[in-house]
Structure formats: C-alpha cells, structure tokens
Image (tube, rainbow, N blue to C red):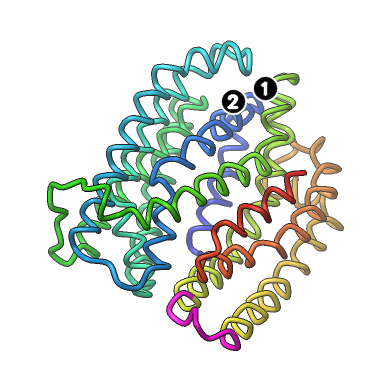
Amino acid sequence: MVGKSALQFVQVAILARLLMPADFGLMAMVLAVMVFVQVFTDMGVSNAIIHHQNISKNQLSSLYWLNVTVAAILMLLLMASSELIGTLLFQQPGLQPVLAALSVSIFLTALGQQLRVVAEKNLRFAVLAKIEITAALAGFVCAITWAWMAPSANALVAGMLVNSAVQTALLWLFTANGWRPAFRLQLGEIQQFLKFGGYMIANNFVNSINLQIDVLIAGRFFPAAALGAYSLPRNLSLTIAGVINPVITRIGFPLMAKAQGDKEFLKLVYLKTMRMTASVNFPIYIGMAVFSKESIFFLFGERWSGSAHLLVFLSLWGMFRSCGNPVGSLLLAVGKADLSLKWNLGLLF
C-alpha cells in the first residue's frame, strides 16, 4: 500500500502540472459512472468466496465465467450508452470517448478478479503486493508519458487500462498455480453465492451513491473545471483512508471469516482494527486540515491554490468517514450482507 500510494501521489502531483482542471473534472465524471457499473461486475460474489470456507473446483469455474460474462455485457452496454450519458446526464459531449475507452478496464479486471480474491482468502499478500506495485508502476509510466506527449484526460485513461491489463496478466502468471477454469456455468451449484451476492450488489450500489452523489450533482450543474477543482482535494481525502485502512482490513476480513464462529476473537480483531486505523488516520487528516494551503501547493502546484479551503472541510469529513470503514469487513466476514445493506441505507439517508 505504501508503494502504490507513493506512486499515486507522485502521479497526481506530476499530472496536476501537465493537465488542466477540466481534464480532472471530466475524469471525475467518468469514474463516478464507472463506480456504479463496477458494482455489478462480479455479481457481489467476491466477498462470498472469502466468507464461504468450502468451495469446489466446479463452483469456482462457474463463478469465474459468471464474472467474465457479466463484465463483458456491462462493457458493451457502457460503450453503447456512453454518448447518451455524456450528453444527457452531464451535458459533456467530450465524455463519450473517454468513458467508452475506460469501459474496457471492466473486462480486463474481471479476467483476473477471482484469482486475486482467492489469493487474499489464502493470505498470499506477499505475491499480491509485488503484482499490484508492478501494475501500478506500469500504469504510472504510461500515464505520465502520455500526458507529457499529448496532455488530455486520455492520459489518465491509458494509465488505468495498462494497470488493469498488467495486473490481470501477472495474477495468472503467479497466483493461478496451474488452475484453469472449466468451461461451465451452472447457476444451480452457485445459488448460495448468488443469494449473498444479491445483498452485496444492493449494498455496494447504495454505498456507491453515498460516495459519488456529490460528483454526480456537481457534474450535472457545474462546469468541468469547477468539478476538477473540487475533485482533486476530495480524492486526496479519500486516498488517505484508502491507503491506510486496507493494510488492516484486507487481512482482517479473511481472518475474521476463518474464525466467524468465535465472537470474542471477532470482537478483538474489530476493536484492534478500529484503534490501529484511527491512530494513523486522525493525525494525518488533522495535519492536512491545518496545513491545507501548504498541502495543496506541495502536491498539486500553485494552479490549484483555490482548492485549499475545500481541503479543510474534506479532511474533517475523511477523518470521521474512515472510522466507519472497518465495520464492513466485520459484517461480511460473518455473512451479514443484509445488515451491511441496512447500515449503508442508514448512512445514505
């Protein structure tokens, strides 16, 4: 996570000096749409794979081809509707080619998604770390090179596509261990996963609304440059918890799932997760709020100085938001996807 976040911070710092606010605004709109589409890519079964401890090879094959098939359909649907989304939803005709190109990442990611989930379930974080850092580095080089030669939002798209492709290729090389999915898609044998996944789809969809509603509203009513000035400090605030929390929760989730019958152990892991993440998150967020002008100038350059006052509020928002994150791992580990849905519905209202 340290390696990935360092690359991400450096990439944003460089691109903020090469690209215009309107480019970041356009990308924020595209990513807001992508977040909703990605909710449906694996039918919510990735977390079900970690929760269920006994899964047959036939079930894994059916789950794999379900994931890939749904991802391919969603990619084609997004390509076909990209012009409509750009003109009607956001009134940004320039959004169409960017959204259509980035939709390919849905399919690329799906080809290796199950391999990553199984590796996480088996706590193979050493190999996952090497794969994710290598993929992030490849995407970093691609995005910077593209932005240097032809500055536009396409640089961000190219970096993300390369990241997805390289990560999937490396997952097959280093985590498959000779496993190949059989050509079967029997919905009957994965019924229990689909039931769990149904709650996960609803849960993730509501969670996506919670996370993206500000961007959707701003993209509809404000110019792309204004959204760009808002989205950069907003994404910075999200990135902090997105870097720190998974260091604990990605390990805590499969551990709690393996010991889901031991309530005292679950309580211990959850409370330690809360203490560890808050102890790191709070000082960073408070520091960002106090030194908002300096943070914006150092990371993004003088062009973005008008966003400094936004970072104060967004840092405080991110600080409290980071506290609620670990509860998701606990609920999914014990199979309470329905309770997770109710939790996020409460947050939405």
Q: Residues within 10 Å of mark 2 (few under 14, many from 20)?
A: many
Q: Is residue 138 left or right of residue 90?
A: left
In the image, which residues are magenta?
257-265
User: In which quarter of the view is residue 142 placed?
Assistant: top left
Q: Are marks 1 and 2 in contact (CB under 8 Å)?
A: yes
- Most extreme residue toward the front is 188
- Classify 38 as above or below 20: below
Q: Residues within 10 Å of mark 1 (few under 14, many from 20)?
A: many
Q: Is residue 64 magenta?
A: no
Q: Is residue 75 left or right of residue 152?
A: left
Residue 26 is labelled as 2
Type of the residue with mark 2: Leu
Front in this rendered view, residue 131 or 214: 214
Q: Quadrant of the C terminus?
A: top right
Q: Which residue is mark 1?
A: 224
Callout 1 secondary element: helix
Q: Is residue 138 left or right of residue 245?
A: left
1 or 2: tag closer to the N-terminus: 2
In x, y percent, where is residue 216?
A: 67, 29
Who's the residue at 36% across and 29% down the image?
A: 75
Who's the residue at 60% across and 88% down the image?
A: 264
Who's the residue at 58% across and 66% down the image?
A: 331
Callout 2 secondary element: helix
